[in-house]
Amino acid sequence: MHSISKMDILNRKFSTVIIGYKKHDVEIFLQEVADTLGSIAEKKSRLDMEVKQLKEKLKEHKDREEILQNTLLTTQKMTDDIKANANKQAKIIIQEAQSKAEDILRQAHKRLAQIHEDISELKKQRTHFEIKLRSMVESHLKLLDAHDDEYLQMEEAEEKLKFLQK
C-alpha cells in the first residue's frame, strides 16, 4: 500500500483532454479529499501519541501490579511464617504447660501418699498412746484400789485399837 499525503493530493496534476472532467470540480474534490486525508493523518498522529501514552501508562500499571503481586506474595509468605511460628510456639507452650501440670499432679499424689502415711502413723501412735495411757490409768487405779484397801485396813485397825483402848 502506497502512502499519500495531503500535499501529494494537492500537488497532483492531471493531464487535460477535451472531453473530460471540469477542472474546477476536480480541484474542489481533490481539496476535500486532501482536507479529509490531512484531518485523518492528524487524528492518526494524535491517536498514535495517545496510544503511546496509554502504553506507557499500561506499562506503569503493569509494573505497579507486579510490585503489588510481589509484595502480596511476600506478605502472604511472612503471614504464613508468622502463623507457623505462632503454632509452633503455642504447641511448645502447651507441651510445657502439660508437663508442668503432670509434675504438679505427680507431686500432689506423692504429697497425698505422704499425708496418708503420716495419718496412718499418727493413728498408730495414738492407738499406742491410748494403750499406754489406759495401762497407766489402770495401774494407777489398781494402786488406788490397793491404797483404799490398805486405808480400810488401817481404819479397821484403828477402830479395833480404839475399841481395845476403851
Image: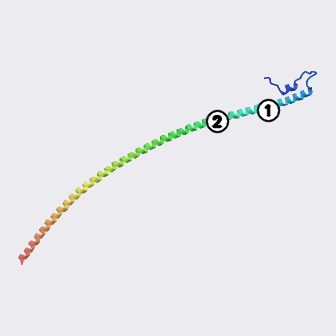
Q: Quadrant of residue 159?
A: bottom left
Q: Nearer the viewer, residue 35 or 162?
A: 35
CA neighbours of label 2 inside 10 A, class few (<14), some (14 to 19), many (20+) = few
- Tell me the kind of residue under disc 2: Glu
**Left or right of 96: which side holds 148?**
left
- Image point (53%, 38%), residue name: 80
Q: Quadrant of residue 70?
A: top right
- Image point (30%, 52%), residue name: 116
CA neighbours of label 1 inside 10 A, class few (<14), some (14 to 19), many (20+) = few
Q: Which residue is mark 1?
A: 43
User: Which label lies toward us, 1 or 2?
Assistant: 1
**Left or right of 20: which side holds 81?**
left
Determine the CA span between mark 1 and mark 2.
31 Å
Tell me the tag on residue 125. Answer: none
Q: Quadrant of residue 53?
A: top right
Q: Nearer the viewer, residue 38 or 117?
A: 38
Q: Residue furthest bottom?
A: 166
Q: Nearer the viewer, residue 89 or 62?
A: 62
Q: Is residue 100 above or below residue 137?
A: above
- Image point (37%, 47%), residue name: 105
Q: Percent from the top left, x then y, of residue 14?
A: 89, 22
Q: Which residue is mark 2?
A: 65
Q: Is residue 155 above or below residue 47?
A: below
Q: State the SS at label 1.
A: helix
**Left or right of 79: which side holds 115?**
left
Q: State the SS at label 2.
A: helix
**Left or right of 142: which side holds 40?**
right
Q: Percent from the top left, x then y, of residue 132?
A: 21, 58
Q: Residue furthest front?
A: 19
